[in-house]
Amino acid sequence: MVLERLKNALFGESENNAADGGDDKLEFAAAALLVEAGNMDGRMDDAELESIQRLLARRFDHDETRAADLMERARNAMTDSVQLYPYARQVKDSLDHDARVELLEMLWEVVYADGVLDDYEANLMRRLAGLIHVPDRESGLARKRALARLGLEG
């Protein structure tokens, strides 16, 4: 038990991870990254929460309740952890290139949900693009698609 907790602390895995709620590790990792993106500017407003829930429901074909539960468990996990790498690694290892670009586009939608890109959010997006192996050019195109979907100018 002590060794398991130490392993979880060292590798950023939460005891409340995907296995607890029946979601696979990829869904939980994506939710955790979306939550981190929404909270990166120091506040998670209703627009960001709604965006995350909608994106999780659409991407993983969940109903509203299941998407809200997944988001809430990810929020709890990210409150207890500052680790991005284990979640980014799960995404990188589980998704093909096009799906990673799609996830990055989802992340852009979350950071722009409030209409403003904060410096911390921009930094997070650069780091995540690198961690999940999406080149800058493709990240920029994903950003433009997200802005267009949100009706914002880039």
Image (spheres, rainbow, N blue to C red):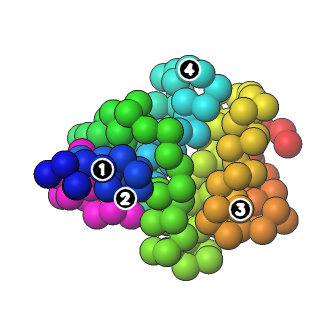
Sequence-wise first label, 2 or 1: 1
Q: CA distance from mark 2 to mark 3?
A: 20 Å
Q: Amino acid at mark 3?
A: Gly
Residue 58 visible within the image: no
Instruction: Tell me if residue 12 can be seen.
Output: yes
| Real-space CA distance between mark 1 and mark 3, rounded to the nearest whole angstrom | 28 Å
Tell me the kind of residue under disc 4. Answer: Arg
Q: Is residue 18 magenta?
A: yes
Which residue position is annotated with label 1? 6
> Is 28 in front, or is 9?
9
Q: Which residues are magenta?
A: 16-27
> According to the image, label 2 marks what residue?
27
Looking at the image, residue 25 lies above or below residue 63: below
Q: Which label sits in the foreground, 4 or 3?
A: 3
| Comparing labels 1 and 3, the label whose residue is closer to the camera | 1
Which residue is tagged 3? 130
140 or 74, which lies in front? 74
Name the residue tied to disc 4.
43
Q: SS at mark 2?
A: helix
Q: Residues within 10 Å of mark 4 (few under 14, many from 20)?
A: few
Q: Nearer the viewer, residue 60 or 14?
A: 14
Q: Earlier in the sequence, mark 2 or mark 4?
A: 2
Q: Please say if 51 is above or below 130.
A: above
